Image (cartoon, rainbow, N blue to C red):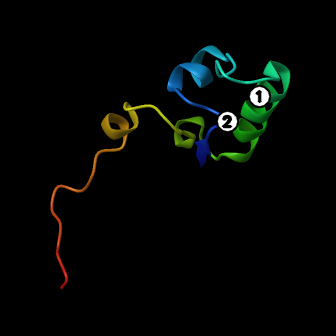
Amino acid sequence: MIASDNVYLYENLERHVPIGTTLDPAANLAAQDRMGTLASEKRLIIPGHDPEVFERFAGPREAVRID
C-alpha cells in the first residue's frame, strides 16, 4: 500500500507519530491506523518520502530492455 503523504517516513509508522506538516495530528494517526488494518502486512505500507524504501524494496538484479 502506497501511503503517499499520509506517512512520510517509516519512523511515522514504527513510532506511531503523525507527519510533521499535518494540520490534524489525530486524523493523520487515524489514517495510519486504517492503513494498518487494510494492509495484509504492516511491512507493505510504503511511506511516500523515505529513502529507506529503496533499501527495503531492492530493485531487480537483472533487467530486460525492450525497444
Of 30 and 44, the residue lying toward us: 30
Which residue is located at x 79 percent, y 23 percent? 23
What amino acid type is highlighted by mark number 2? Asn
Contact (Cβ within 8 Å) of mark 1 with mark 2: yes
Q: In the rendered image, which quarter is residue 35 located in?
A: top right
Residue 64: x and y, percent?
A: 17, 73
Which residue is located at x 77 percent, y 28 percent? 28
Q: In the rendered image, which quarter is residue 51 located in?
A: top left
Q: Residue furthest bottom?
A: 67
Q: Which residue is mark 2?
A: 6
**Image disc number at residue 37:** none
Which residue is located at x 61 percent, y 42 percent? 3
What amino acid type is highlighted by mark number 1? Asn
Of 31 and 25, the residue lying toward us: 25
Image position of 61 with respect to 29: above or below: below
Structural crowding at the residue carrying mark 1, measured as other residues with C-alpha within 10 Å and reported as few (<14), some (14–19) or many (≥20):
some
Which mark sits nearer the N-terminus, 1 or 2? Answer: 2
Secondary structure beneath label 1:
helix
Relative to residue 59, is residue 25 drawn left or right?
Answer: right
Image position of 66 with respect to 18: above or below: below
Which residue is located at x 77 percent, y 25 percent? 29
Residue 60: x and y, percent?
A: 24, 56
Relative to residue 47, is residue 56 drawn left or right?
Answer: left
Secondary structure beneath label 2:
loop
Q: Which residue is mark 1?
A: 28
Q: How many marks?
A: 2
Structural crowding at the residue carrying mark 2, measured as other residues with C-alpha within 10 Å and reported as few (<14), some (14–19) or many (≥20):
many
Tell me the CA gap for discs 1 and 2. 6 Å
